[in-house]
Amino acid sequence: MSAAPPSRHLPPARPWQVALPLPIGAIEFLPPHGLPSQAAPVGFRVLVPWRGELTVSVVVGEAPGKPNARLREAVHVLDEIPWVHPAFVEAAWGLSKLARTPIGLLFSDLLGVGWEARLDHQVRAVAEADLSAFGLKVPGHEWSGADHHATPLLDAIREQGLLDERFAPVPRTVTGYRALDTGLTALTRRQQDAWTTLRAAGSLGSQVDWAARAGVSPSVVAQVLARGWATSIQLPAAPPTLPEPSARVCGSAPDTLPEAEVWRLHGGRSAERHARLAPRIARLLRLGRGVLVIAPDGATLRNAWEDLSGLAQPSGTRAVCFSGGLNPVQRAHAWELIAGGQAGLTIGSALALCAPHPDLGLIVLLEEASDAYKLLSGSRAFLPELVTRMAAAGSCIPLALVGCVPAAESLLYRGEVLPPPKARLHVVDYSSPPEQAELGPLSSPHLRPGDLGYPLSHDLARVLRQVQERGRQAALLAPRRGYSALLRCKSCQHTPGCPNCDVALRFHQERRALHCHQCGYEVTIPDRCDRCGDPMWQARGPGTEWIVQEVRRLLPGMPVYRHDGDHQDDLSALQSGESAVVVGTQGLLSLDAPPNLALIGLTLADTWLNISDFRAGERYHRLLRQLVAWHPSRAPLTVVQTFQPTHPALTCLKSGQDAGFYPAIEVRARQELGYPPHRLLTYIEVAARDRARAASSAQQVADTLHGAGAAPGEVLGPAPSPLARVRGVYPYQLLLRTRNEERLNELLGSLDRRFAARVRVDISPRGMG
DNA sequence: AGCACGCCGACT
DNA sequence: GTCGGCGTGCTC
C-alpha cells in the first residue's frame, strides 16, 4: 500500500523538518516526489499535505537518524530563494529546543507573511495509473484544475503516489473593462460617449475610473455593460504602494562606531543616535549588504523610519518599512522586494526579524531594554534573545544594540554612551513629613490638603499655573488608567475584588464601573458595601481620570486631554501648539511630544518601583530618561513626585550621569542576588483549575528538579503566584537560577514529561517573580 | 490551533 | 434514553 519510490536504486532521501503556523513542533516530510536528492532547503516554503489539505510550511532542517516508518512526501517547494532568513531559522530552532517552545508557535508569531499561497494548481493521474477505484470524478491523464476535484479524494490519490501535480504562481489582477464592437440594445448619447472613451483607452481599471474619464456618471457605464457593449476582464494589478522613504537624510559624519560582532550605542536623543548610526548603515548599503533595523513599538519605528529611510540606496533598491500595519498584499510585496535583494534597508517591527535579506550585513535592535520586546502570548518569545542567537548563528551577522538606555544585559558588549540631554529636574519629596513616610504610597490620599498636596503637590500645582499663564503645554503621567487603583468602604475597609482574579477592581468614574484590569470583568458600582452595607466609598491610588479632574479644578478654562488605554482624546490642537495639559499613562510617550512642552509631571513615580520585579529599578530609570529626552529639542521642567527621592535611578539623572551609569549599578547589585545577567533566570508556572492539584503538581515539579541534581540555590519555590487566581486557574510558580544554558537545558530536560497540571516554562521572564 | 474521541450530568 | 460539557491526544 505504500507509495512507489521515485527510483529504486537511490538511497532513501533524508526527511525534511518543517514548521507549520500551529503550536506544534517540527513535522517530518519526505522531499517532494522526483526531486533530485538535495540538502533540506532551510528557510524555503513548501506545500505539505496536512489534514487532507495542502498547507504552507517552512523548512527548518533535516531530520536526524532513521526515516520514520510512514512519512508522507512534501508536494511542492514554493520558493527559489529563502522566504525566511536561515539565521532566523537557526535561532528559532535553538530557542525552541532550549525553551521547550513549539517551533511552529515561534513561526506563527514572527513570520507575518506568506502563509497562504496563491497558486494555480493542476493535477493529472500519473501515466500508468488506473484511478477507477477512486470513484467517478477523478483526474484523468490530461492536466485539470485541482479545484475541480474533491480535496480529500486528491489527497487519497496523492498518498498512493498516483498523482502528478504542478503549480504556477497566480499574478494578482484587478477587474477591468474592455469595449465590445456589438451589443444587445442601442446606446443613448451618453452611453455612446462612455463606450467611445473605453474603446479609445483599450481597457480601464474600474467603473469609477471609466466614468470619470468619460465625464459621465457611474450609472451610465453600468448601462453600457448591461447592454452588452463592454465586458469585464482581468488586468494585472499594479504593485501595492508602500510607505515612502523620508526625504530627510541625517548624519554625514565619519563612521566611528565599533566594529565588533555585537556592539552598542546608547544615551543622548534618538536623533543623535540615528545620526551616529547613519554612516555605518550607508556604508553597508553602498557595499550591497542588507541592513535590518528592528523597533519595539510604533513610535520608535516611525522615528527610525523618519531619520534613516532617506539614506542613499544603491540604484534599483529602496528602503522598506515592514510591520503589522501593512495589509497582506503590501506585506507580500515588501517581502518579495527584500528576498529579491531590491530592499537594502528594512526598518520594521518584530515581524521583520526573519526578513530574508540575501546578504544581511547588520541587525540594529532599537531600544533593546524595552519590555515591548516580550511577546505576551503565543510563544512568549523575547526578541533580544532571538536576535542574539541570530547574531551568533553560523553566518555571524553583526548586531548593534541602540537605545535611550542600555539594558543591564547589554553592558558586557563594547560600545558608546552619548552625553545625556540637558534635564531640568525637580523632585517633590512626599516622604519628608516623617510621620507620613511610613504610610507608603497607597495610603497617601490621607495626606491632608495643606501638607504637600495630593495627588498634585503644591510645587506641581504652582508650575502648572505658570504653564497656563504663559500659554505653554504640560504633560502629566499617572501610573494607571481609570479613576483609582481601588475603591474602599469607608466604614469596614472592604475593597471590591474580581471574582476571577483575586485583585482589587479598578474604579472607572466615567463609566461608573468597577473593572478588572487582569481579565476584563466589569460591574457597575454597588450602591453600598456588600460586606457592611455602608453606602460610602473612598477611592485610593489616583489614575488618569482622577488627575484630569484635579487639573480641571486647578486650572479653570485650561483644555485638559486624556490619553490612555481606555480613552484617547483628539490631540491635534495640542500637537499644533495650543496651550493645554495632557494626562496619560506611559503610552503617552509613544506619541510625539507636544511642540510647546514646558512641563512634564510624574504624579507618582513609586508605582514603577513597587512592582515586585528585580527589573523595576531599571525600568524606572528608563522611564525617567525617556521623559527627559521626549521632546526632540527642548528640556522641559520635569517634576517627579515620589516617596523615594534618593533612589539612584533618580539621583544619577539629577547629577548629570550618563545613561549607562545606573545600569552598571544594577549589574553590580545583581551579582550577589544571582540575577541576570550573572545567571539565567527561568520562570516555571504550574497551573490547574483545582488549587490542590496545582499545588501538589508544583511540588512534584520541584521534586523532579531536585531529583535531577538541582542545587538548593538553583530552584526557588514553588510559591503560589502573587495573584492567587487568574482567569479561574490557580497558578504556582518556581524560578530556576542556572549558571548557563547547558545547565538550564539539563534541568529542564528532567521536566520533559507529563504532570497533572499545566506546566509552562519561560526562559526570558519579564515583569514577574 | 483545530478536531476527534471519550467519559459523566441535565434534559427534549 | 440522548445532548453536551471539556480533558486528552494527534496531526507527518
Image: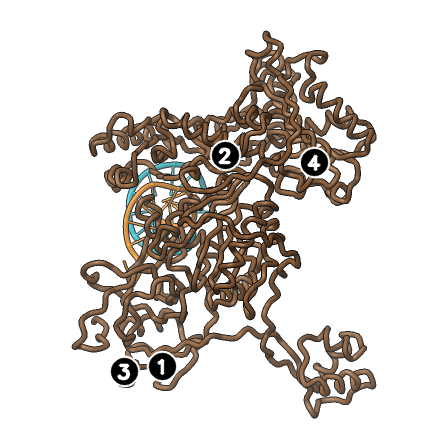
Chain colours: A brown, B cyan, C orange
Q: Are marks 4 and 3 on the same chain?
A: yes
Q: Are marks 1 and 2 on the same chain?
A: yes
Q: Which residue is mark 2?
A: A660
State yes or no: discs 2 and 3 in contact (Cβ < 8 Å): no
Q: Are marks 1 and 4 on the same chain?
A: yes
Q: Mark 3, chain letter?
A: A
CA separation, marks 1 and 2? 66 Å
Type of amino acid under label 1: Arg
CA separation, marks 1 and 4? 64 Å
State yes or no: discs 1 and 4 in contact (Cβ < 8 Å): no
Lower position in the chain sequence, tag 4 or tag 3: 3
CA separation, marks 4 and 3? 71 Å
Q: Which mark is residue A562?
A: 4
Lower position in the chain sequence, tag 2 or tag 4: 4
Q: Which residue is mark 1?
A: A124
Tag 3, which secondary structure?
A: loop
Tag 2, which secondary structure?
A: loop
Q: Which residue is mark 3?
A: A129
Quarter in which the N terminus of chain A is drawn: bottom left
Where residue C12 sits in the image (x, y, percent)? 29, 63
Could you tell whether A609 is left or right of A176 in the image? left
Q: Is disc 2 surrounded by few (<14), some (14 to 19) or many (20+) residues within 10 Å?
A: many
Where residue A566 sits in the image (x, y, percent)? 64, 38
Q: Is residue A188 above or below residue A92?
A: below
Q: Mark 2, chain letter?
A: A
Where residue A188 sits in the image (x, y, percent)? 81, 85
Q: Is disc 3 surrounded by few (<14), some (14 to 19) or many (20+) residues within 10 Å?
A: some
